[in-house]
Image: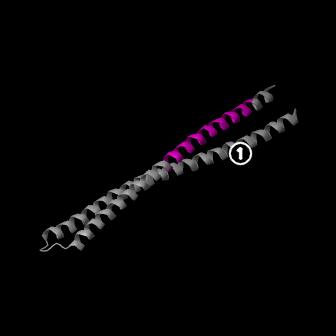
């Protein structure tokens, strides 16, 4: 009987360590999900700032073209290049947002998996604790 008790206690200790490990993983995944969500928000804010800056620079250059006495071809070309540069900046910012959202979804899925694993581990731990109680009362 003592051998069974000590075996059950060892199994219980191992199971508790596994459950603790699963809980730590779950907390880590939760922090990753939170960080990914904040990253998405930051990138969206950066997109808005980029759009505002691009529009302001384009409006300023366009006003200087309109208000100028003579319009030279090189100034029009420079304005067109500026527009293309602004479009590229906005597209890059959108791409960064999409990547951040994808990372957020991955971290959310990983969190769900770790929550499920922790629940399974806790159920096994409870089963072992119940088995110990039953053997001690016999």
Q: Is residue 18 above or below residue 79?
A: above
Q: Residue at x 51, y 48 (%)?
A: 33
Nearest to the observer: residue 49 or residue 60? 60
Q: Which of the colour schemes (rainbow, by chain, secondary structure, one colour) is used?
A: one colour
Residue 11 image position (x, y, % from top left):
78, 39
Q: Badge 1 is on which residue?
A: 17
At x 80%, y 30%, the residue is 136
x and y, in percent, of residue 129 in the image? 73, 33
Q: Which residues are magenta?
A: 103-130
Taking the magenta stretch, the answer to whether it contains residue 112 is yes
Which of 66 and 133 lies nearest the eye of the viewer? Answer: 66
Residue shown at 70%/36% (left/top)?
125
Residue furthest toward the top? 138
Q: Is residue 30 above or below residue 56?
A: above
**Element at label 1:** helix
> Is residue 9 located in the magenta-colored stretch of the structure?
no
Q: Nearer the viewer, residue 18 or 32?
A: 32
Where, by quadrant of the figure, is residue 70 drawn?
Answer: bottom left
């Amino acid at each position: 009987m003592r051998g069974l008790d000590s075996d059950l206690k060892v199994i219980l200790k191992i199971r508790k360590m596994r459950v603790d490990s699963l809980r730590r993983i779950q907390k880590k995944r939760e922090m990753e999900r939170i960080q990914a969500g904040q990253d998405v928000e930051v990138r969206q804010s950066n997109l808005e700032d980029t759009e505002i800056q691009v529009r302001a620079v384009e409006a300023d250059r366009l006003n200087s073209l309109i208000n100028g006495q003579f319009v030279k071809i090189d100034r029009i070309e420079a304005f067109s290049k500026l527009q293309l540069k602004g479009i590229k900046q906005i597209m890059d910012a959108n791409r960064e947002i999409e990547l951040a959202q994808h990372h957020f979804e991955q971290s959310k899925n990983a969190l769900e998996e770790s929550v499920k694993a922790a629940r399974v581990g806790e159920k096994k731990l409870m089963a072992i604790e119940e088995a110990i109680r039953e053997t001690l009362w016999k």
